[in-house]
Amino acid sequence: MTDFTNANVVLETRDLTKHYGGVHALEGANFVIHQGEHVAIMGDNGAGKSTFVRQITAVEQRTRGDVLLHGKPTHFSSPIAAREAGIETVFQNLALADHLDVPSNLFLGREKVKFKFGPFSILDNKAMREATMAGLEKTGVKIPNILNSIENMSGGQRQCVAIARTAAFASKLTIMDEPTAALGVQETAQVENIIRTLKGQGEPLILISHNMRQVFDLMDRIVVFRRGRICANLKVSETDPQDVVAYITGAKTGAEFPEAA
């Protein structure tokens, strides 16, 4: 297993915290991911995993703490700002427009244009189709006809389109939130192959998953959340599923567990 400790740090959080009134959904999360590293975030429902990602991607604004991208403090005003900075996210609901084709979905909100005439624009459809094909090729995604609308595609194809959207742009970090939770065996295998492709290209990735087999097959490190806090930071090569479950359930607790850094 590769040692990433000397690799460039892509993203770091320091004391990242989110309170909803009196509810402490996330408390003091210290986290680091390095260039080329694939890190799984695990924990029971309500442990703080998705809350953590929402603070990184500016879906919500954090209560306190710092987020650093390539060593520079960031405070994104919106998910669009995070995306423009290079953080691409595949959420559980995919955020795809069913009535649009693949290129239109990949470039939704950031369309390429040939000309602008005041409030009117002429889209550069050829450039968007070419960039779409490049993004699909980069991730190994095979879509028979990219001009088909999303609503006519299988669940696995839809998920692959959402993932390919992250590769069509110069992303610095990809985040996937349970990308295979609603997929069958074959479709899950296709998504996992995309993750392996990104790994081979040295792309850093954060994966939220409950799938223990998937995590141990694909990830370098596991960060466990429990009750809004990071309770363990484990190298996949130095742990096992039973150990991870013990952290998730609270059977193992205590100050001896390392910080996620």
Image (cartoon, helix red, strand yellow):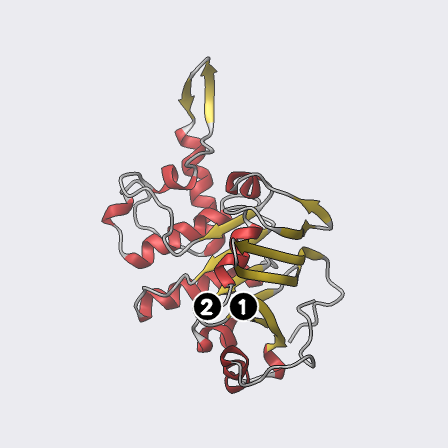
- Of all residues, the one furthest to the right in this rendering is 6
Q: Residues within 10 Å of mark 1 (few under 14, many from 20)?
A: many
Closest to the observer: 40 or 139?
Answer: 40
Closest to the observer: 136 or 35?
Answer: 35
Residue at (54% x, 68% y) in the render: 40
Q: Quadrant of residue 38?
A: bottom right
Residue 184 in the image: x percent, y percent? 30, 68
Question: How far apart are the alpha carbons under marks 2 and 1?
Answer: 7 Å
Disc 2 vs disc 1: Cβ atoms closer than 8 Å? yes
Q: Is residue 149 above or below residue 183?
A: above
Q: Which mark is residue 199?
A: none
The amino acid type of the residue labelled 2 equals Ser
Q: Is residue 188 above or below residue 144?
A: below
Closest to the observer: 54 or 119?
Answer: 54
Residue 53 in the image: x percent, y percent? 53, 56
* N-term-proximal mark, 2 vs 1: 1
The amino acid type of the residue labelled 1 equals Ala
Instruction: Classify mark 2: helix, strand or loop.
Output: loop
Q: Which residue is mark 1?
A: 40
Q: Which residue is mark 2?
A: 209
Q: Which quadrant of the rendered structure holds the C terminus?
A: bottom right
Residue 240 in the image: x percent, y percent? 54, 85
Residue 192 in the image: x percent, y percent? 44, 66
Q: Which quadrant of the rendered structure holds the N terminus?
A: bottom right
Q: Is residue 184 above or below residue 126?
A: below
Instruction: Classify mark 1: helix, strand or loop.
Output: strand
